[in-house]
Image: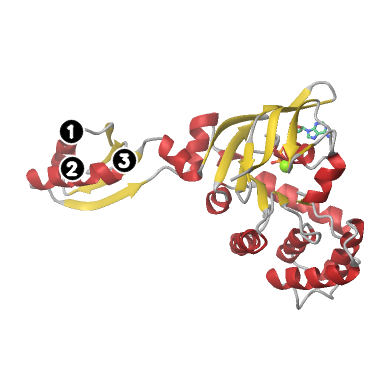
Amino acid sequence: MATIIETKDLTKIYGGKVKAVDKLNIKIEEGEIYGLLGPNGAGKTTTINMLTTRIAPTSGTANVGGFDITRRSLDVRKLIGVVPQDFTADEDLTGRENMMMVSQFYDVPKAKAIETCGVLLKMVELDDAADRLVRTYSGGMRKRLELIIGLIHEPRILFLDEPTLGLDVQTRTQMWNYVKEIQKRLNVTIILTSHYLEEIDELANMVSIIDRGKVLITGTPTELKESLKGDIISLTLVDQKSAELMKTVPDVLEVTDSGPNTVKIKVTNSDESLPKIINFISQHELSTVRLTVTKPTLDEVFLEYTGRSIREEEGGADARKFAMNMRRVRR
Ligand SMILES: Nc1ncnc2c1ncn2[C@@H]1O[C@H](COP(=O)(O)OP(=O)(O)OP(=O)(O)O)[C@@H](O)[C@H]1O
Ligand SMILES: [Mg+2]
């Protein structure tokens, strides 16, 4: 695989004091869906804006598709598609008209644009609504339109800044399927920012957790989860005496009380430890009422590396932002 994006100490300081991106180093391989995961204000949009040449770095640099973002910004722009965090489509035009308009900015020959437009609209199932004014679209339809507008000139790299922000869970899942389909069929490299853990887990094959403009850790979602080394086996037994006995089970990280007749056993790897624990139970002729295994989620990974839960920052901020975006669109 070839590296398609590489940043070197990429830094953005706004107004001489707000360090939004702080010596960021990431490397993205061609064909990947690369996720930037971080809470509000982490520097995700600023990073995307620099990589897409919308704003200049304060220091450091990046190479996108073989070109330096500062010195060869025009070449970079031809290679990339951008779906910004905020809605940009003109709602007094139809979906198709919006796409055709953008195709002109990129000098796509008209016949080619008409063809690509048709294919893309079909891909996200907007073909039936293509000739309706965007103002009649639902939030999910707008997001789908924004997604394909970014692809009209057939870019090699697609930047998606919070593609499902403010969407309901069902619409979000639908959007994930479109993104996967697009990646597969068009073979584009996708850089995705999100503060939804499930989204990154579902879509990204590589992820960097960023906070306060810095990369805290990079890896595949599975690697990050496994790096925590802490599966939890929760066991409810018939009585407290049996539960107490479980505290003597060998070769585990930790056993703690967790409710009536229940213990939580922390192990490095549940696949390896579970047989041993079951063995222990049968040797001591104990009866189990319930047994569950929980593997760490990306939320726990986030907590481990940042010291706080990303969920605390979800919800309120999302709803506010979505409302703000909708107001902007309506004007
Ligand atoms: N134009 C600007 N001028 C000054 N400060 C800015 C500007 N844009 C962003 N910032 C600040 O830079 C930091 C990073 O913002 P950025 O928008 O990149 O974060 P983000 O990770 O995209 O957040 P969100 O999840 O809210 O979209 C924040 O502290 C923000 O307030
Ligand atoms: Mg942002």
Residue at the image point whose x is 35% and y is 41% from the top: 231
Q: Secondary structure at mark 3?
A: loop
Residue 87 x %, y %: 80, 55
Q: Earlier in the sequence, mark 3 or mark 2?
A: 3
Residue at the image point whose x is 72% and y is 50% from the top: 157
Residue 105 x %, y %: 91, 56
Q: Which corner quadrant of the image does residue 269 belong to?
A: top left
Q: Residues within 10 Å of mark 2 (few under 14, many from 20)?
A: some
Q: Where 218 falls versus 182 (above or below)?
A: above
Q: Earlier in the sequence, mark 1 or mark 2?
A: 1
Mark 3–mark 2 CB contact (< 8 Å) = no
Q: Which corner quadrant of the image does residue 147 belong to?
A: bottom right
Q: Secondary structure at mark 2?
A: helix
Residue 315 x %, y %: 63, 47
> As drawn, which residue projects farthest toward the bottom?
128
The amino acid type found where label 2 is placed reads Lys
Relative to 282, is 329 on the left or the right? right
Can residue 69 be seen by looking at this rendering? Answer: yes
Residue placed under numbered mark 1 in the picture: 250
Q: Secondary structure at mark 1?
A: loop
Front disc: 1 or 3: 3
Q: Where 34 falls versus 68 (above or below)?
A: below
* Image disc number at residue 117: none
Label total for image:
3
Q: Earlier in the sequence, mark 1 or mark 3?
A: 1
Residue placed under numbered mark 2 in the picture: 276
* Image disc number at residue 269: 3
Question: As rendered, which of 19 and 50 lies closer to the eye?
Answer: 50
The amino acid type found where label 3 is placed reads Asn
Q: Quadrant of ligand 2?
A: top right
Q: Residues within 10 Å of mark 3 (few under 14, many from 20)?
A: some
